[in-house]
Amino acid sequence: MCSANEQTDNRLASASSDVDDAVGIPGAKWFIAIINNHSEKSTAEKLTKMGVENYLPTQSEVRVWRTGKRVTVDKVLIPSKIFIHCTEKERRELVYLPFINRFMVNIAAKRNASSNRPLAIVSEDEIVKLKFMLGASDGDVSFSERFVKGQQIEVVRGPLKGLVGEITEDADSGVTRLFININCLGCASVAINPKDVKPLNDNDLH
């Protein structure tokens, strides 16, 4: 086990590395903070009380206990992660909070002059789409830690009308799913009727 001093030194080193990664990032951005599993909701509450803008993707889910009682709970979509909207200066301070482990880096990007990879940044458009999907969808939204390439479409009917994303059809089940890719994380998806979407080009949907 590490001593208290060793733990502090390790955290300082991690924070220093993150600072180097983010040099040159202007204004407030959506960063991805890594936190302990099962601490997502409490972390969101603490950040909100501090006045720090954050977003924890959740969806209401009805669970039935053994007694037959039905309870509605907020299911966390992406475990051990939370989106934080802040400036680089603010992020450098937030990384020292005891409930923030570190900030995610973009492992697919090239290392910079300091041999560090840049921090993962999620666009405002991706956050808006994710919020809309989770808030308006009638079906269960799932998350996968992989990226999917499909046909670009726009939803023209139903609760998700206006959402732009991509669709694929599961070869085994035949279910068509609408998904949005989230930079450095993967994709969120939900089942959708192909008749409720239209392509963003002149090609017919298949």
Image (spheres, helix red, strand yellow):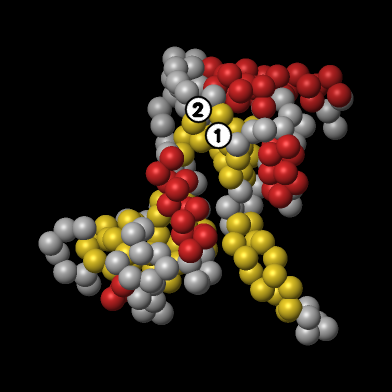
Q: Quadrant of the N terminus?
A: top right
What's the mark number on residue 85? Answer: 1
At horizontal 50% and vertical 53% (from top left) the residue drawn is 131
Q: Is residue 202 shown above or below 94? A: below
The residue labelled by disc 2 is: 28
Binning the other alpha carbons within 10 Å of mark 1 as few (below 14), some (14 to 19) or many (20 upward) gives many
Mark 1 or mark 2: name the one nearer the start of the chain. Answer: 2
* Residue type beneath disc 2: Ala
Q: Quadrant of the C terminus?
A: bottom left
Q: Is residue 186 left or right of residue 154?
A: right
Q: Nearer the viewer, residue 80 or 88?
A: 88
At horizontal 70% and vertical 70% (from top left) the residue drawn is 72
Q: Is residue 178 shown above or below 56? A: below
What's the mark number on residue 26? Answer: none
Asked which secondary structure carries label 2, the reply is loop
Judge whether residue 154 can be spotted in this image: yes
At horizontal 24% and vertical 66% (from top left) the residue drawn is 198
Q: Quadrant of residue 204?
A: bottom left
The picture places residue 170, in percent across and down from the top left corner, at: 37, 72
Asked which secondary structure carries label 1, the reply is strand
* Residue type beneath disc 1: His
At horizontal 72% and vertical 25% (from top left) the residue drawn is 96
The picture places residue 69, in percent across and down from the top left corner, at: 78, 81
Q: Is residue 156 shown above or below 120? A: below
Task: Check the image and name the residue furthest to the left.
Answer: 202
| Mark 1 touches mark 2? (CB < 8 Å) | yes
